[in-house]
Amino acid sequence: MGTVPITIVPMQSRYNKQVGQLLAQAFHGKFNMLTKRNEDELARFFEKLLEYIPTEPSTQRMVALQQGEVIGSIAIKRKPIVDTKKSRQKLPSWRMLSQFGSWSLIKMLIGLYVLDHKPEPGECYIADLAVHPDQRSKGVGRLLLQWAQQVVEMDPGLDRLSLYVSASNPRAQQLYDQLSFQTLSRENRWILHLLFNESKWDYRVQRREGF
């Protein structure tokens, strides 16, 4: 019996719930420590947050589908083109705030802000990569990363793919080693230790061929 094919497609609002669940499963250990919220609550938070992320040319999310189900997701971002016109962004509603708890919401937003990275010119940054627990070690993450590699290869304005990964995540480190991501620096940040109990993070880069 053949392997069920996996397709990589652009994010749509109908995938918000499944992607929210993926993000909660992938990052529950970090954000549970910060907010003491369970996985279902974190999934609802990420689902709602996806509704308020503005669509910009500098950001892009893709999902991996198998038999119509989301089994993985990746988000990339690059340095935005300066635009004097400021677009209006929807803010989280008070209903969302009250459901999650105002203090928990504030701590989550602080955590996301601290983890945020502002790409330099030519840099395509992987903001997050999540794979369903049942699909890990089956090549889904590799497929999503290969899609990101193709984005860099096809865009003359980009020369590298980058990401941050916890030094205490050997599975991810091994995958990035296999895909020739080089460690440029290891940062020891007390604020990340305070928020997530993980202070050592590797900044890794894969340069486009010829650069």
Image (cartoon, rainbow, N blue to C red):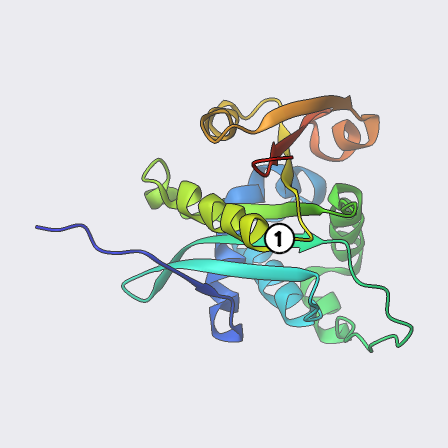
The percent coordinates of residue 2 (x first, y second) are 12, 51
> On the rendered image, what quadrant is the C terminus found in?
top right
The percent coordinates of residue 171 (x first, y second) are 46, 27
- The residue at the point 58 percent across, 22 percent down is 168
Up/down of 23 relative to 115, above or below: below
> Does residue 179 appear left or right of residue 71 in this picture?
right
> Does residue 128 appear left or right of residue 103 in this picture?
left
Residue 28 appears anywhere in the view: yes
- The residue at the point 76 percent across, 32 percent down is 192
The percent coordinates of residue 146 (x first, y second) are 45, 45
- The residue at the point 62 percent across, 28 percent down is 166
Q: Which residue is mark 1?
A: 76
The percent coordinates of residue 107 (x first, y second) are 78, 49
Up/down of 139 relative to 66, above or below: above
> Does residue 131 appear left or right of residue 94 in this picture?
left
Residue 39 appears anywhere in the view: no
**In the image as oriented, which residue stretches furthest toward the front?**
210
Residue type marked 1: Ile
**In the image as oriented, which residue stretches furthest toward the right?**
84
